[in-house]
Image (cartoon, grey):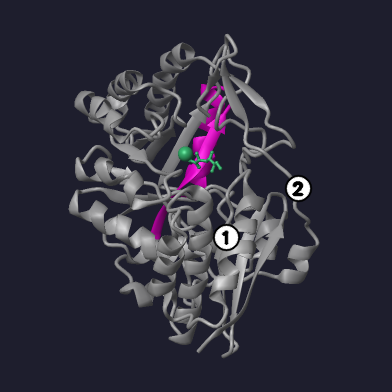
Amino acid sequence: MKITAAKVIVTCPGRNFVTVKIETDEGVHGIGDATLNGRELAVASYLEDHLIPCLIGRDPRQSEDIWHYLYRGAYWRRGPVTMSAIAAIDTALWDIKAKLADMPLYQLLGGASRSGVMVYGHANGRDIEEACDEVARYREMGYHAIRAQCGIPGLDSTYGVSGDKLFYEPADADLPTENVWSTEHYLRHVPKLFEALRDRFGFEPHLLHDVHHRLTPIEAARLGKDLEPYRLFWLEDAVPAENQEAFRTIRQHTTTPLAVGEVFNSLWDCKTLIEEGLVDYIRATVVHAGGVTHLRRIADLAALNHVRTGCHGATDLSPVCMGAALHFDLWVPNFGIQEYMRHTEETDAVFPHAYTFENGYLYPGEAPGHGVDIDEDLAAKYPYQRAYLPVNRLRDGTIWHW
Ligand code: GCO
Ligand code: MG
């Protein structure tokens, strides 16, 4: 069996997505997500100019060998562009392999370890009251786990708070927009949000919060402590995580569970965090962490150290990534939770998929492969549009983490 053709499809049904489609001499094709928010064309070029020429003629069933060929063969290892490109090919190859076996991907990985995939949704409001009302709306939709963010008095805008509630989209402009940040205002306000949420909803719903890398370790330690009475499911991305050892400071001071890793692209990015038990949930996902082949290695190391998975699932991860992630989630023994930000109707139409939502759970479906395809004619109607994530500045103008 041979790979006969492979191509990259860039489409913008409301936001940009990069998809790889691999075709074979047996008529079976597979697709993989290669979207890297705000840097989409770099991955498209990496695929078209550097990886696809190496694929033609290879046996698509040798996904393990192809992964190492692309990873080690480049000499230049890791990094988000490289790993998203490898991930897309790997996802497409697993899709092909499962279709050949006439099985949903989760069966090929080892079968279902649970009946459904618990997901969390995003509730946000301009103030505490609006955020509480949004959490109520998610409860009505059936969610058992909800991430809560709210506006901070004294700041015009902040991460995670948007006008369009269901389809929050941070990559919002042709050139980066600028937000203003104050750690002091934020640290004073966030505990009040969770106090109000627990007062209104009790301790039954899982509540999560994303700091989006904005604190220093000692500030994060203080926030974790302040939030302990409200029993968060997790506190996410408390500090930028290039320096894994920095989490030791946070860990020494608080029992609030910690999640990290949506920007990680390899096992090496989280090795110390996992081996020292410095976090509770690892957020790496299929598209940015080298595909199913590499993500399962991360999950296996995590399992040895009591760390569970919590795959990133924002709208910039396409339905193709979501489909593959759900098969992974249904199988992975140390599953924690899956993020689920809904895609727009336009996006869902371009990517017909087998997965479904019911009562707070997603189900990957029983279609052979990962269950997601691309309507190429429809995709062609939405040309690429440059879009950037915002940048963040302190009130004196200093560039800060976003
Ligand atoms: C999340 C993330 C996203 C990111 C986005 C960047 O937890 O869902 O932080 O909102 O900002 O995916 O591309
Ligand atoms: Mg996040």
Q: What's under tag 2, amino acid-wise?
A: Gln
**Quadrant of residue 162 within the rendered picture:** top right
Label 2, residues with CA under 10 Å away: few <14, some 14-19, many ≥20: some
| Residue that extends furthest to the front in the rendered view of this protein | 75
Helix, strand or loop status at disc 1? helix
Q: Nearer the viewer, residue 236 or 86?
A: 86
Q: Residue at x 72, y 55 (%)?
A: 13
Q: What's under tag 1, amino acid-wise?
A: Pro
Q: Residue at x 43, y 86 (%)?
A: 101
Some atom of ligand 1 lies within 8 Å of the CB belonging to the residue at label 1 = no
Q: Answer with left or right where residue 13 lies relative to residue 360.
A: right
Extent of the magenta region: 117-142
Some atom of ligand 1 lies within 8 Å of the CB belonging to the residue at label 2 = no
Location of mark 1 (residue): 319
Helix, strand or loop status at disc 2? loop
Mark before the other along the chain sequence, 2 or 1: 1
Q: Is residue 358 magenta?
A: no
Badge nearest the viewer, 2 or 1? 2
Q: Is residue 131 magenta?
A: yes
**Quadrant of residue 208 within the rendered picture:** top left
| 113 relative to 61, above or below | above
Q: How many marks?
A: 2
**Quadrant of residue 361 within the rendered picture:** bottom left
Location of mark 2 (residue): 385
Residue 126 visible: no
Task: Give residue 42's position: percent from left, percent from top.
Answer: 63, 51
| 217 relative to 355, above or below | above
Tell me the distance, in whole angstroms, between the alpha carbons under discs 2 and 1: 19 Å
